[in-house]
Image (cartoon, rainbow, N blue to C red):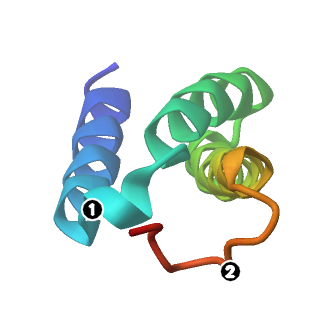
Amino acid sequence: MTRILIRAALIFAAVALAGTAEAKGCLKGAAVGGIAGHMAGHGIMGAAAGCVVGRHEANKKDKAAQPAGQPQGETAH
């Protein structure tokens, strides 16, 4: 149990230090992936994979919400 808490704290610290722009979708995905991975005996790999999937889904959502004529990364004036 202590090892799980230490790993969770390290993952949380790494994500927190990465910055808010990078963490979008990652925290939720890492939590879900970590739990699923823990059940299969691979908590760290599950959290990492969950983070990647969470980021991918957040990027898809942002891209879909963007106006059609506006290039990605620019704001409307």
* Disc 1: which residue: 14
* Disc 2: which residue: 71
- Front residue of 19 and 36: 19
Asked if residue 16 lies left or right of residue 39, the reply is left
Cα distance, mark 2 to mark 1? 31 Å
Q: Is residue 44 above or below residue 9?
A: below
The residue lying at 21 percent from left, 54 percent from top is: 16
The spot of residue 61 in percent (x, y) is 72, 44
Label 2: few (<14), some or many (≥20) within 10 Å? few
Q: Are marks 2 and 1 in contact (CB under 8 Å)?
A: no
Split into 4 quadrants, where in the image is the N terminus? top left
- Front residue of 22 and 15: 22
Asked if residue 25 lies left or right of residue 39, the reply is left
Label located before the other in sequence (2 or 1) = 1
Label 1: few (<14), some or many (≥20) within 10 Å? few
* Residue type marked 2: Pro
Quarter of the figure with residue 69: bottom right
Quarter of the figure with residue 68: bottom right
